Amino acid sequence: MAVTRFCVRSYEQDSRIFPSTSAKLGLLLLAIALIALPWVAGKYIIFIASVAAVSVIGALGLNVLTGYAGLISLGHAAFLGVGAYTAAILSTQYQLPFLITLPAAGVFAALLGAVVGIPTLRLKGMYLLVTTLAFQFIVEHIVYHWEDVTAGDRGINLPDPDLFGFTLDKYMGYYYVVVALAVIAAILMKNLAMSRTGRALVAVRDRDIAAEMIGVHVAKYKIIAFIISSFTAGIAGALYAYLLGLISPDHFTLNQSILYVAMIIVGGMGTVMGAIIGAIFMVLLPEFISAISGPISSAYPLFAPRIGGISVTIYGLILIFFLLFEPKGLVGIWLRIKRYWLTWPYTY
Amino acid sequence: MALLEIQDISISFGGVHALRNVSFTVEKGQLAAVIGPNGAGKTSLLNCISGFYKPTQGKVLFQGEDITPLPPFKVAQKGVARTFQNVELFSNMNVIDNLLLGRHNYFKGGYVRNALLGYRSKDESRERRRVEEIIDFLEMEQWRKHLVSDLPYGIQKRVELGRALAQEPSLLLLDEPMAGMNLEETEDIARFILDVHQELGTTIVMIEHDMAVVMDISQHIGVLDFGEKIADGPPEKIQNDPEVQKAYLGENYEAIRRGEAR
């Protein structure tokens, strides 16, 4: 469907991300809400909002790899873990400040990402999935057993994050840092998607042979996708580590990797918007389930012991639902609603 | 020096000799065609030129340089563009993005600049302008924002030609540009091919089954049969070549014509 826009005067204007005033107004309202949140909300809500922002960054990273380049990965949580442990070790054993540990976490994860990316030059689909799964287990194993460095399952206590000598309040300053980084990540990813790099990645996903024949260095772009994705994951992991204050291997398991895959599927794969919405949705879902599980267990006491298992089941059901009925994810639903109201009250 | 010189190449898959000692020369500015019955090795020949297949023997010289060992993307960067027998477009993108991908190697900015500027970079608007010129040239204005997968087959073929032109190639390889088209679409594409050849001066090698078109527009024809080149020359010569007639019409062609065979 082609949306006709009037009076487009330049190519830049024609390819704008947010062409309409209402979209800009919506963004402004969102920005005000994000800025006002820590002043009006309680600590728990601020904490959940920070977790959501961190997940948005992580999901944006996986979206580059799986959504754009079509390289499916079950090792995303391992990259987050690498970032988290890099930040934790550098800040506790070497007393380095947040401003250094954060980029260091990204860079170290990116280096590992480049290494993990090398097999993708020959592997696709299921075989690649198994390779990334192996990476996930290798990282889990190392984190558990290299106790001198990672402290095994006792975990590492992180200091409070600091910026230019000021300690950041978890429920005020740090929230702003995390949200700002999520916004920056989203903007950079959107720019990347709408540029030569993004197009080349999608070309590699859709038809790698044709991409190669028109002059796209397919091997290079696959590695690039891994590097961008794991760098972003490393940053998200470091932010998560500072947010929790205590990290242990349990935070970066295969379940987390699957959760990230679920985020981009539910949100809508291959779109920046989808990664954002999916991440927020999957962070809020367990909160929603636990909110309703109280009343349910008091109303049906027999049901109470099983309520914990329910959330995993609901995850599974939602994932199956989206794969079957809405492969374009929440973004697909949103676009359909928008298209409907665009011409309302006419049908077309 | 010829623009493209194929020297004695052979390639086989298992026991099948797809190409056997084939040599073929295309001069700069020529509109050449390769014809032959199904399975004669025409597409294999194109795949050898664009670096997708590596011949077991022989060389492909492009502008005097041996391009046989180069990977396909490097061959493309040297100035060889192609279209495919079965349309190989990026179907989840619109026409503009497909053509912009053809311009891939004309962008100068790196990843950092891409991430910081996105569509606002000078590269993007400059290349978008070039793409619009190609859209004009191939008369595709009305489809520029359509998803490629929503377009009819004939238009998809034209978009693919556009993507190849976006590479500004010095050699354009067309693999059955008219396959599966009706008469009107065939005439359109034939006109565009002639436009490309005459207005842009691009050298073209085309594989095609539609003999009327081939004889009409090409200046030089090579004929393949069972992986071997059986004839080579201008259309008039090919039409009257007994080997070619035998390949297309069978051993008894002459006899049938004289009414002697059963």
Image (spheres, coloured by chain):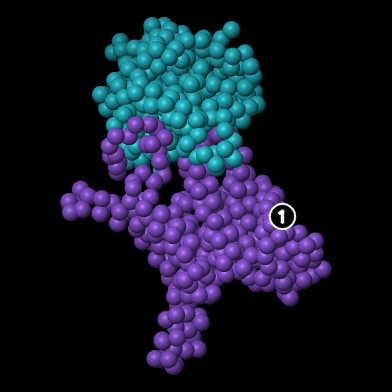
Chain colours: A purple, B cyan
Query: In the rendering, at what x and y percent does residue A172 appear?
Result: 57, 67
Q: Which chain letter matches label 1? A: A
Give the left or right position of residue A51, taking residue B142 as reference. right
Q: In the image, what residue occupies the spot 36% across and 40% down?
A: B147
Query: In the rendering, at what x and y percent does residue A159 appear?
Result: 71, 68
Q: In the image, what residue occupies the spot 47% across and 80% down?
A: A290
Q: Is residue A55 above or below residue B242?
A: below
Per the image, label 1 sits on a secondary structure element best described as helix
Give the left or right position of residue A220, taking residue B180 as reference. right
Viewport quadrant of the N terminus of chain A: top left
**Any part of residue A121 in sight:** yes
Q: Quadrant of residue B34?
A: top left
Residue kind at label 1, given as amino acid type: Ile
Farthest-out residue, right: A148
| Mark 1, residue position | A100
Query: In the rendering, at what x and y percent does residue B178 appear?
Result: 35, 25
